[in-house]
Image (spheres, helix red, strand yellow):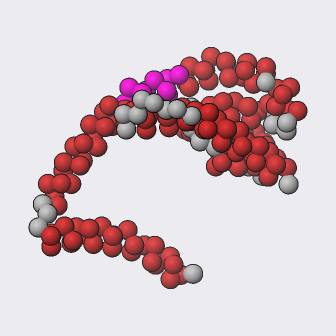
């Protein structure tokens, strides 16, 4: 097992050295290509910043206004019917937009109920088996200039609900 640990420590530097070495042997201006790629990446980041700020601001407004708690109260009956406590509903709603904000809600749940409680295990499994749908779609599709998303939203929502259902089942075991 220790061999795997040592191997994992050297594999990434070895790959980097191989790529740089291969480029140098092939006569490719490695440093110039690296700088060009870094500039292109920085341009992509700058183009994504307004989208990220908008998403984070929207989550902050929803959270501080009490709208998430209001929505959780409305969905409480349906949530409890399928085995989702009311405290978990805001995590589900926020997770679709922002993983960071959902992590903050999860930490609040851990503080109030403990990570080994049923609710703690439920949100832990749920966080690892669902995706930030709207963040992913807006950021990655914007970066790749995808305009026709076709069935992406429906598929992502279906996968998220499947992850939520699996979380309920697994946490109940």
What residue lies at 71% left-to-right and 39% top-to-bottom?
A: 161
Is 59 located above or below residue 140 in the figure? Answer: above
Q: Position of residue 56 (x, y in %)?
A: 50, 28
Visible in this render: residue 107?
no
Which residue reaches farthest right?
81
Is 47 located above or below residue 16 in the figure? Answer: above
Q: Is residue 1 left or right of residue 47?
A: right
What residue lies at 60% left-to-right and 38% top-to-bottom?
A: 156
Of the pair 163 and 102, the residue shown nearer to us: 163
Q: How many marks?
A: 0
Q: Position of residue 154 (x, y in %)?
A: 62, 33
Locate the C terminus and report the quarter of the image it occupies. Answer: bottom right
Q: Main secondary structure of the magenta part?
A: helix
Q: Position of residue 130 (x, y in %)?
A: 64, 43
What residue lies at 77% left-to-right and 43% top-to-bottom?
A: 165
Of the pair 102 and 163, the residue shown nearer to us: 163
Q: Position of residue 3 (x, y in %)?
A: 50, 83
Visible in this render: residue 97?
yes
Q: Is residue 121 left or right of residue 148?
A: right
Q: Which residues are magenta?
A: 49-58
Residue 79, quarter of the rendered image = top right
Locate the N terminus and report the quarter of the image it occupies. Answer: bottom right
């Amino acid at each position: 097992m220790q061999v795997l640990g040592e191997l994992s420590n050297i594999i990434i530097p070895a790959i980097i050295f191989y790529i740089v070495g291969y480029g140098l042997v092939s006569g490719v201006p490695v440093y110039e290509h690296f700088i060009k790629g870094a500039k292109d990446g920085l341009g992509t980041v700058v183009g994504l910043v307004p989208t990220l700020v908008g998403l984070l601001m929207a989550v902050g407004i929803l959270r501080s206004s009490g709208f998430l708690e209001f929505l959780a109260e409305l969905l409480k009956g349906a949530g409890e019917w399928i085995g989702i406590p009311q405290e978990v509903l805001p995590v589900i709603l926020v997770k679709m937009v922002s993983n960071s904000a959902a992590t903050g809600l999860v930490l609040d749940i851990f503080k109030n109920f403990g990570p080994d409680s049923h609710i703690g295990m439920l949100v832990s499994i749920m966080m690892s088996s669902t995706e930030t749908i709207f963040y992913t779609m807006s950021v990655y599709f914007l970066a790749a200039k995808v305009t026709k998303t076709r069935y992406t939203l429906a598929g992502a929502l279906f996968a998220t609900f499947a992850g939520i259902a699996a979380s309920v089942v697994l946490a109940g075991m």
